[in-house]
Amino acid sequence: MHNEKSDLRTRLLTERRALSPEGRAEAARALAGHAGELAAPGTTVAAYVSVGAEPGTRPLLDALRARGVRVLLPVLLPDNDLDWAAYEGPQALAPAGRGLLEPVGPRLGPEAVTQASVVLLPGLAVDRQGLRLGRGGGSYDRVLARLARAGARPVLAVLLYEHELVEQVPAEPHDRPVDLAVTPSGPQRLG
């Protein structure tokens, strides 16, 4: 199982790096165009700042904020868990470890994610049943477990390039399915 996931991660990361900067920018703009389908004004979305060749989130973060959506962004803790802070615009992001950008505002605590009506999860692939292949760090597995413990039922969505919606992702018993795959062509219900 571990080797299967590892091999798939390697292949998908290689494919992402092969995308042109123009193609990535176009995908990021298309994802931002779906902000209205993801969240209504006055709701809270837990999101993240994309890095490297991940589907770009910055235009989406700004589109959500412009719609009156409260956006929470993660702050990586030393134990790989996530704290959260409100997104106040690109000028309020600062470099952090592992090449990440994090919000500079007050920390709201790891439980803040339970207030979100939508949680955007990074991932490398999702299958039609909603199983997500993450990067393997476990941070978002903790977020999903925290949501379950709190009885919170936000919409779980993964931002992907079109080719990353796949037939099957290798699954382990602790993997929790997600509800939506959001690609540049639009959100698709899973499961």
Image (spheres, rainbow, N blue to C red):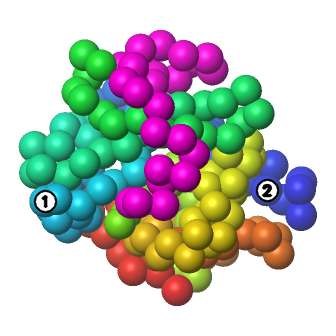
Amino acid type, callout 2: Lys
* Precedes in sequence: disc 1 or disc 2: 2
Which one is nearer the viewer's eye here, 146 or 155?
146
Which of the 4 image quarters holds residue 49?
A: top left
**Considering only vertical position in the picture, is 131 above or below 102?**
below
Residue at figure coordinates x 60%, y 31% from the top left: 76
Secondary structure under the numbered disc 1 in the rendered image: loop
Q: Which residues are magenta?
A: 93-116
Along the viewing direction, whichever of 59 and 89 lies nearer the viewer: 89
Residue 103 located within the stretch drawn in magenta: yes
| Mark number, residue 41 | 1
User: Which-is-in-front pick, marks 1 and 2?
Assistant: 1
Q: Which mark is residue 5?
A: 2
Q: Return the x and y of residue 10 as percentages of the image width and height.
A: 72, 42
Work out how far the residue at label 1 is from the one at label 2, CA to CA, in angstroms: 37 Å
Residue at position x 81%, y 49% from top? Answer: 6
Residue 73 shown left or right of residue 87 in the figure: right
Category of crowding for the residue at label 2, using alpha-carbon neighbours closer than 10 angstroms: few (below 14), some (14–19), many (at least 20): some
Q: Is residue 42 visible?
A: yes
Percent of width and height locating residue 51: 48, 29
Residue 34 in sight in this render: no
